[in-house]
Image (cartoon, rainbow, N blue to C red):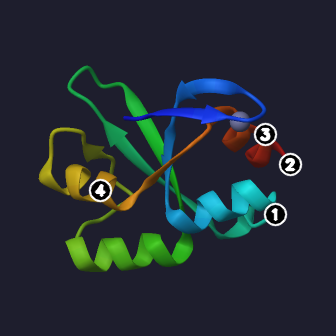
Amino acid sequence: MSYIICENHGGNIGSLVSPEVLQWVIKLKPFQDKVRMIFIQDNNDNRYCYYVDEEFYNEFSNKAEVDLTIPLRLDDDIAFELSLELVPVCPKCLHEWLEN
Ligand SMILES: [Zn+2]
């Protein structure tokens, strides 16, 4: 997790997205039809979701040989590897973009 400072929303804990989704959010491009969600579940059964583009989703599932329709465990190596390829975005900007 990383702290992120947004021009519009100030400081927040960043949400993780793929680099391509970050560009879409920054430019407010409507690409929601190509957005996929990857679910992560922690030991308390809380679920988180990372937004990624379709290409990233397919590449990562092939490379890691993992079925991303099933939530990844947060303490799993694959979830860690995934987090290394993602970038933080302001959660409020992400939310606004998703609602558009
Ligand atoms: Zn923001």
Q: Which residue is mark 4?
A: 84
Q: Do callouts 3 and 1 mark residues in contact (Cβ within 8 Å)?
A: no
Q: Which residue is mark 2?
A: 100
Q: Position of residue 20 (x, y in %)?
A: 58, 68
Q: Do callouts 3 and 2 mark residues in contact (Cβ within 8 Å)?
A: yes
Marks 2 and 4, how far apart at CA: 28 Å
For numbered disc 3, what is the local secondary structure?
A: helix
**Nearest to viewer (mark 2 / mark 4):** 4
Indicate whether 95 appears above or below 63: above
Q: Which residue is mark 3?
A: 96
Ligand 1: which quarter?
top right
Q: Do callouts 4 and 3 mark residues in contact (Cβ within 8 Å)?
A: no
Residue 7, quarter of picture: top right
**Nearest to viewer (mark 4 / mark 3):** 4
Q: Do callouts 1 and 2 mark residues in contact (Cβ within 8 Å)?
A: yes
Judge: label 3 CB < 8 Å from ligand 1: yes
